[in-house]
Amino acid sequence: MNSQNKINLNDTITYPIKERKNKVGVSDFVSNEIDQDIINNFPEILAGNDFRDIVNAIADAYYHHKPVIMMIGGHVIKCGLSPIIISMIRDGIITSIAMNGGASIHDCEIAMIGETSEDVGKNLRDGKFGMWTEIGELINHAICNGDQSIGEALAARLNNSNMLYKDKSILSCSYRHIPITVHSAIGADIIHYHPSFSGENFGKASAIDLNIFIEQISKLCDGGAVLNVGSAVIMPEIFIKSLNVVKNLGFDVKNFTTVNFDMIKHYRPMENIVRRPSELGGKGYFIVGQHEIMIPLLASCVASRLGLNVRFGDV
């Protein structure tokens, strides 16, 4: 060791702590007692504040009759959240649903057999993955009218069926209650490879879905919220382009809340859901957490804030 070292810690200067500016104080802490209104148990710090803002934005949209659009990916259904979303539809909290193709397939499987989420690795070995006759025919045959969207066609088919589990289907329970749309890239879903698939029928129906979705986006003015849950690519892309086109058409869409719920932070949702829309006013949030925890928490907090009974079931 160099004996000529000029560093001497005895020369450091310390200061009175009362001179320091701090970011957190006991006034920000949670209460000593558990509040029945769950949101009051969150500290007024970081994501605690964000979650409270989100709940308040949804409650404000409810009170002022503004849209709350929920966009979902397939994992939302695979982890058992359909009854919660159905409850939020029934209570008038969610005003429209947009799902990617995978979500629609999982939802139809739940309605038909009460199960979903096949073992892809096992079935991939011999080419059986997704090649299940009944599901392909259900979806592909429903999309043949020519004047219905995919969402409308599937919702009607499931709701008017005698399927044992249709009360657990978001599509079925949305029928005649709220607009529900399906957005799928051709080739991204296994039903596109079935002999029952018609590209012509699918394309026509998809265009109607898109127009319905754009109409819902056009209603986001000085209030309302867009919640993207578990779609990392399809719904963020469709949302930002639909938002652009309503501005292009002259709609005064601004000052609304956007929220992305996912288990990790992805680039596209961060840009298209959280950051870019906030340039029109309003605010964007990214809540990281497991869907099976965060969505029940959100639903419970919103219901509590609105004074609604928390009961998860059919419409």
Image: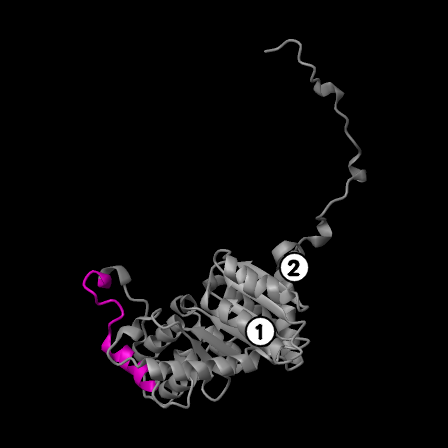
In the rendered structure, the answer to whether residue 195 lies left or right of residue 26 reads left
Location of the N terminus by quadrant is top right
Residue that carries the numbered disc 1 in the rendered image: 243
141 is within the stretch colored magenta: yes
Q: Report if residue 95 is visible in the image.
A: no
Residue 285, quarter of the rendered image: bottom right
Residue 100's spot in the image, x, y percent? 42, 72
**Type of amino acid under label 1:** Leu
Q: Is residue 115 magenta?
A: no
Residue position for label 2:
49
Which marked residue is nearer to the observer: mark 1 or mark 2? Answer: 1
Asked whether, in this view, residue 270 is left or right of residue 143, the answer is right
Residue 171 at what x, y percent from top left?
42, 81
Disc nearer the start of the sequence (1/2): 2
For label 1, count other residues whose C-alpha is less than 10 Å away and answer few (under 14), some (14-19) or many (20+).
many
Q: Residues within 10 Å of mark 2 (few under 14, many from 20)?
A: some
Specify the amino acid type for callout 2: Asn
The residue segment tinted magenta is 123-142
